[in-house]
Image (cartoon, helix red, strand yellow):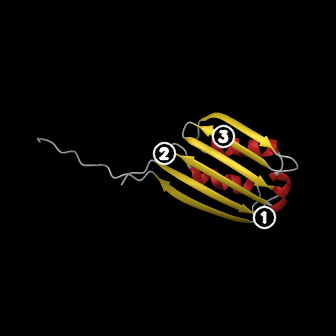
């Protein structure tokens, strides 16, 4: 069984609310997590909501990192998807958990694109 990718989902509760509403800090955190774990950044977009909250996506050659925050609840939803072995999404997840000071993180990894590789038949 081969898999095309790994998708790490973060439920980050009881985070530092000020950091969850700081677009520059969140962008820096997500960029740092990508670079430190070997991802190749190819683009990004972040948006500050009023009265609060941030959403952001970093496109990487290996796939993406996304964050959505609700400072009023001390909560962030993060997902990190990668295809290929050059980038470790779990390591990136731990960097993000620490940066947001989550006191109640939940990290779930989903294997994506599990394919059965057919055996070649020759001489038919």
Residue occupied by mark 2: 85
Which image quadrant: the C terminus?
A: top left
Distance between mark 2 and mark 3 Cα atoms: 18 Å
In x, y percent, where is residue 113? Answer: 44, 51
Counting the numbered discs, the total is: 3
User: To which quarter of the image does residue 15 belong?
Assistant: bottom right
Secondary structure at numbered mark 2: loop
First-in-chain label (2 vs 3):
3
* Mark 3 residue crowding within 10 angstroms, few (<14) / some (14–19) / many (20+): many
Secondary structure at numbered mark 3: strand
In x, y percent, where is residue 107? Answer: 62, 61
Residue occupied by mark 3: 58
Q: Taking 107 as reference, is 29 above or below it?
A: above
User: What residue appears at the point 42 percent right and 51 percent down from the top-left corner?
Assistant: 3
Residue occupied by mark 1: 14
Label 2 vs label 3, nearer the camera: 3
């Amino acid at each position: 069984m081969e898999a095309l990718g790994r998708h790490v989902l973060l439920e980050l509760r009881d985070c530092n609310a000020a950091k969850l509403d700081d677009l520059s800090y969140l962008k820096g955190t997500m960029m740092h997590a990508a670079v430190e774990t070997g991802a190749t950044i190819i683009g990004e977009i972040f948006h500050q909501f009023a009265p609060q909250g941030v959403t952001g996506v970093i496109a990487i050659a290996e796939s993406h990192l996304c964050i959505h925050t609700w400072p009023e609840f001390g909560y962030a939803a993060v997902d990190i998807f990668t295809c290929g072995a050059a980038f470790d999404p779990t390591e990136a997840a731990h960097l993000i958990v620490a940066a947001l000071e989550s006191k109640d993180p939940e990290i779930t990894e989903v294997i994506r694109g599990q394919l059965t590789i057919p055996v070649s038949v020759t001489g038919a």
